[in-house]
Image: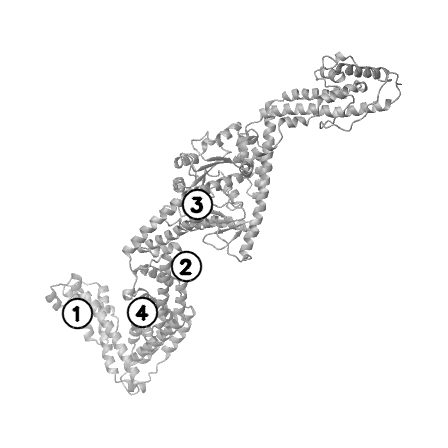
Amino acid sequence: MWRTRGAAACVICRSLANRSCGIKRKPALQNLHLASRGIHHPCHPSSKFPRPQLRTSLQQFSSLNRLPLRKAKLLSVRYGYQPHRNFWLARLASRLLKIRYLILGSAVGGGYTAKKTYDQWKDMMPDLDEYKWIVPDFLWELDEHIDFEKLIKALPDADDLAKLLPDFDKIGESLASLKGFFSPGSPGETAFRATDQGYDNDKQFKKVSDKEKIDQLQEELLRTQLKYQRMLERLEKENKELRKLVLQRDDKGIHQRKLKKSLIDMYSEVLDILSDYDASYNTQDHLPRVVVVGDQSAGKTSVLEMIAQARIFPRGSGEMMTRSPVKVTLSEGPHHVALFKDSSREFDLTKEEDLAALRNEIEIRMRNSVKEGCTVSTETISLSVKGPGLQRMVLVDLPGVISTVTSGMAPDTKETIFSLSKAYMQNPNAIILCIQDGSVDAERSIVTDLVSQMDPQGKRTIFVLTKVDLAEKNVASPSRIQQIIEGKLFPMKALGYFAVVTGKGNSSESIESIKEYEEEFFQNSKLLKTCMLKAHQVTTKNLSLAVSDCFWKMVRESVEQQADAFKATRFNLETEWKNNYPRLRELDRNELFEKAKNEILDEVISLTQVTPKHWEEILQKTLWERVSTHVIENIYLPAAQTMNSGTFNTTVDIKLKQWTDKQLPNKAVEVAWETLQEEFSRFMTEQKGKEHDDIFDKLKQAVKEETIKRHKWNERAEDSLRVIQHNALEDRSISDKQQWDAAIHFMEETLQSRLKDTESVIEDMVGPDWKKRWLYWVGRTKEQNIRNETKNELEKLIKRDEEHAAYLANDEVTTVRKNLEARGVTVDPCLIKDTWHQIYRRYFLKTALNHCNLCRRGFYYYQRHFVDSELECNDIVLFWRIQRMLAITANTLRQQLTNTEVRRLEKNVKEVLEDFAEDNEKKVTLLTGKRVQLAEDLKKVREIQEKLEAFIEALHQEK
């Protein structure tokens, strides 16, 4: 049955082919492809397709599904049909079928080629497990939230998918019924030619070398990484701006609700407290810090600036710029600013003038911290940098390690830098950021050996290779850079290895331009294209993130241990205080300074409570002690040698005028200032019974000395005082007998004091008298015997002439010398004159004292100006003038003291105390002792331990 129907169809095909005009004859069936013969003639015995039962009417099929379309009635064909009838319909059907099977053949051939290409690419693809970090973490965690097995079960299986493909058997059956309409360039032939062409392309693709495929894959991977990196940077920038707005609103107080302090802010407070105690606190501080070490000019400062996102450090070409440790605390804030711990000034890091001022200030602080004769300093400069998007951590930039001490450096510079670096790296929780210059030979590195000694296992070391752009340009073998990065050229081990580019060497480059240059370099660098470096090992951005992660990991691992250590230390200190100072409060150095400050100010105020009488008595007595020698020797004695009262008064007035103009006011001011110092010192050092605390003595002494050093008497005081003293000495009018007697008493006391001093001098010259020699068994020296003989001879001379002048004539000296030589005493003329001066002085003072007794009843004659009287008491008037001048001067100085100088002194004391309060070193020097140090340690440990406990509690709550 099937054969009969098939033969009938073949007859129809041949009839249509023979009767069609203008249709070319088809090639022989044997020359066609095996599959093509089957399609052209389904009755051919070599056809591979199964023969379905031929239906009475043809059924049309879609190429997309097997559902039967609308049935079409097949026209009956007869042998005698004319060739020109319905020719256009057959031609149209032939053309439509060509287009249909062109598309179908292309789809089948392209699918086959695509499948083979996919399988080949899949075999050549490298293992991308190492690049999982490129894809965000939440994509790897999708399997935890989505059940992929359920999705796979819900999808149709391979058999169901195969049903969607067209039924090639039905297609062959349909084509067999219309084969007469096929031209030599049939659609099936075209389709499989396309398949053959795809196969040829597949063979050509295989010829492409594996190296080019790997390069293409790496370039594609690099582009993907850079795209993801730019996307990440864009998101970070947006996040940075949003956080900046939030922080600005919080600063302005827009949010009235109290925000809970974040974990990172709490730890930042701990770091700030510890940074203040680093210089003086001796407790083992093992909290993490990032220590930046490297050879000189290796790029440490540049790396730190890239992390801080600002050019904040002074720069120099080849010379040592970092002369002391610089501790930088990075934190997040609404504005990009920097400030020192001991200063309130904020430097705006977005303005170039503030950046220049900051760099200059850092350089000045470094130079000031370096002691004379040294090159580097161990004093740490603390700097805080805040800004949106900054990674919170603490970094310490140390001076670069050197191999040779050059001219201009101290001899111990190399050893000082080594010891300083070791001191910071000895902290077991310190993260060592080892910086190596990639543009120089690795064998010249010094710091790697030092880091290997401090961290042999590399458990807390991060290695950074700088200036990679210069290294790639200059190094002949790029693999050497890979060996450096992988740590194969050094004995040093590290947690991670990074390569960065910190600019083109131009100090005027901005951070943004350096970032762009770094990104452009690594995008085109062979180091990434050849897989010598991995994408996460390059750029300072990745370095900053890695250092921050390592820093916080170290913090979480060590903070509880540190809290326990501080808790144990606190218990020990509290126990020691209770045993040694049970009745005293725990006052630290600052609190003790405030207490001492109040006591000192109270003592200064006590100066205003001194009575005017006390001031004037002290001033008058001290001033006379200071000027009495000048009055007696230069005024009174020369005037007393005159022959009459007129000459006496004239000599006195002249000498008093000269003295007042040149010396007296200055002496008076000196006396007043010394008196104020003595009273101030007396109040400062006076012990106040049981309330006295000797811990303040050193501080009070320093305040007193500094205040006296700063205080200067009012310069206009001398001018006003000179006028007052001159007017007082011009007055000669004694108003009453009481003043007259007071002047006589003052003169007698002065002369007796001088007489006593003179007799003491004479006794030293001539030796003890006969009573002392017999009672104390002492004798005279040879010189004393000579002076004693000379004294006896000169006393005879005065007895012969009681009105003798004050000086010996030359013939009198010769006479005395010859008389002594006659008794066997050889004497020098100078010794005679020297002895005469003391002998005559004693004689004159005794005579003046006798004259004072005579003048006690001379006030009456004074009122009459000594008219008709042989008694003259001009010397009493002189001493009255001196006495009155002293009283008026003392009163004037007392007014200046109480009204002006005491207040100025109190102001100076306050200034000194304020200066001392700001100088921590001064307070440490002046407030010392076991009690102070114990209170200081106790306060520090309590504060640190409380902060750490609060931080740990917040850390646990977050977990």
Front residue (pair 277, 136): 136
Closer to the N terminus: mark 2 or mark 3? Answer: 3
Q: Which amino acid, by three-letter code, is at mark 3?
A: Pro
Q: CA distance from mark 2 to mark 3?
A: 26 Å
Front residue (pair 233, 66): 66
Q: CA distance from mark 3 to mark 1?
A: 83 Å
Q: Nearer the viewer, mark 4 or mark 2?
A: 2
Q: Quadrant of the N terminus?
A: top right
Is 216 situated above or below 514? Answer: above
Percent across and percent down for residue 900 are: 41, 71
Q: Residue at x 25, y 75 (%)?
A: 749
Circle 2/circle 3 CB separation < 8 Å? no
Percent across and percent down for residue 661 are: 39, 71
Closer to the N terminus: mark 1 or mark 4? Answer: 4
The residue at which mark 3 appears reads as: 325
Q: Nearer the viewer, mark 3 or mark 1?
A: 3
Front residue (pair 173, 907): 173
The residue at which mark 4 appears reads as: 626
Question: Which label is found at residue 792?
Answer: 1
Is 548 situated above or below 876? Answer: above
